[in-house]
Every structure is written in C-alpha cells, then in structure tokens.
Amino acid sequence: MHQTLLIIDIQPSFNPPPWLISGIQPFIGLLPTVATVERHNESHTPFQRQLGWHPAPDDDSLIAADRIFIKHGYAPSPETLDYLKSQNPDRVLVCGLQTETCCLAAGFALFDAGLQPTLITDLTVGSSLDRSGGLGIRLWEHHFRHTLTSSELLASLGTS
C-alpha cells in the first residue's frame, strides 16, 4: 500500500509534548513524510483579531519531514494538497496537533481532494478543549471512518 504521512503543526509555538515528537520519529525514513507549519499572517487569517492569540510568524517544524509546507489557518495549503495528490497515495496518514481543529481540517481538505485521510489516533493531541483528542477522534471516525494506531501502522510496515 502506498501511503504518505502528513504531520500537522509540530512546531515550537504549540509546545507539542515530547511523547508526540518521539512517537512520530520512527516513521521518518519509513514513509514519505509531509509536515505543515502554521505561521501567523493576520492578513491571511485573523487569529489575533478574532481569537486574541496567534502562532509565531517564523516557526519551523520540529520534525525533519521530506517536505515542509507553510500554511496560514487551520487547513493545509493548496500547495500541500497538490503535492499530496501528485504522490498518488492509497491513503494519507494524519498525525499531529489539534485533533478536532487542524487535523480535522486536514481530513476534510484531503477528503475533498479525493484522497483517503486516515488518522493515527495515538499520535495526535487535542486542543485545550480536549487534550486527549477524544472528541476529534470521534468526529474523524464519524466523517472519514479510517483510523489506526501507531503500533498497527508499524506492524503493517513490517516493523514492530
């Protein structure tokens, strides 16, 4: 099965837990990897005006992915989606931060682009509303059905 790993917003502004970074690392080199980094640009997305906070304007990914794309807002950029579509994967594996916002937005964008989004449930962290990510996982299962754990993925890749 041809699959690509999409890593959502693992960057300093969002202070990802160390276990999340170390949980993603084993997949680097095993799968093609794409990471998004959310950068603040108020003219693109009004985080400060509407929410009273914003990500840094110059963050970089804390994961050394094969390709890194900058985004402004919740969803992946059109360039990210074009790149993923050009890879013609059977599925796009999603992990990272904000299960019920940025990861879910990525799921909708991938789905709308004709790709199969699949959430790695134990490699995601929810927003401050639900740090467990449970709400986002339930929404993901409702909208896209496809989920798996990192151990299931490692087993499918022949490395457990």
Image (tube, rainbow, N blue to C red):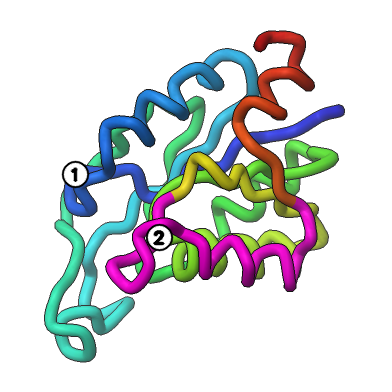
Q: Is 126 in the magenta?
A: yes
Q: Quadrant of residue 98?
A: bottom left
Give, as a three-letter code, the residue at label 2. Answer: Gly
Instruction: Specify whether residue 77 is in view.
Output: no
Q: Which quarter of the rendered picture does the C terminus lie within?
A: top right
Going by the image, does 130 lie left or right of 139?
left
Mark 1 — residue? 12
Is 91 drawn above or below residue 45 in the view shown?
A: above
Q: In which quarter of the image is residue 86?
A: top right
Q: Position of residue 91 (x, y in %)?
A: 78, 43
Going by the image, does 151 lie left or right of 156?
left
Mark 2 — residue? 126
Give the crowd class for mark 2: few <14, some 14-19, many >=20 residues within 10 Å: many
Q: Which of 62 and 25 is in front in this view?
A: 25
Q: Which residue is drawn at 65% across and 65% down?
A: 140
Going by the image, does 127 lie left or right of 36?
left
Give, as a three-letter code, the residue at label 1. Answer: Pro
Q: Where is residue 138 in the image (x, y as percent from the top left)?
A: 63, 67
Is 53 drawn above or below residue 146 in the view shown?
A: below
Highlighted magenta segment, given as a residue range: 125-146
Q: Which residue is drawn at 46% across and 40% down?
A: 35
Q: Position of residue 42 (x, y in %)?
A: 21, 77
Secondary structure, mark 1, is helix
Q: Where is residue 135 in the image (x, y as percent from the top left)?
A: 52, 69
Between disc 1 and disc 2, the foreground one is 2
Is 52 drawn above or below residue 27 in the view shown?
A: below
Q: Which quarter of the rendered picture does the N terminus lie within?
A: top right
Instruction: Specify whether residue 106 is in view.
Output: yes
Q: Quadrant of residue 155?
A: top right
Q: Which residue is drawn at 27% across and 44% down?
A: 16
Q: Which residue is drawn at 76% across and 10% down?
A: 158
Residue at mark 1 to residue at mark 2: CA–CA distance: 16 Å
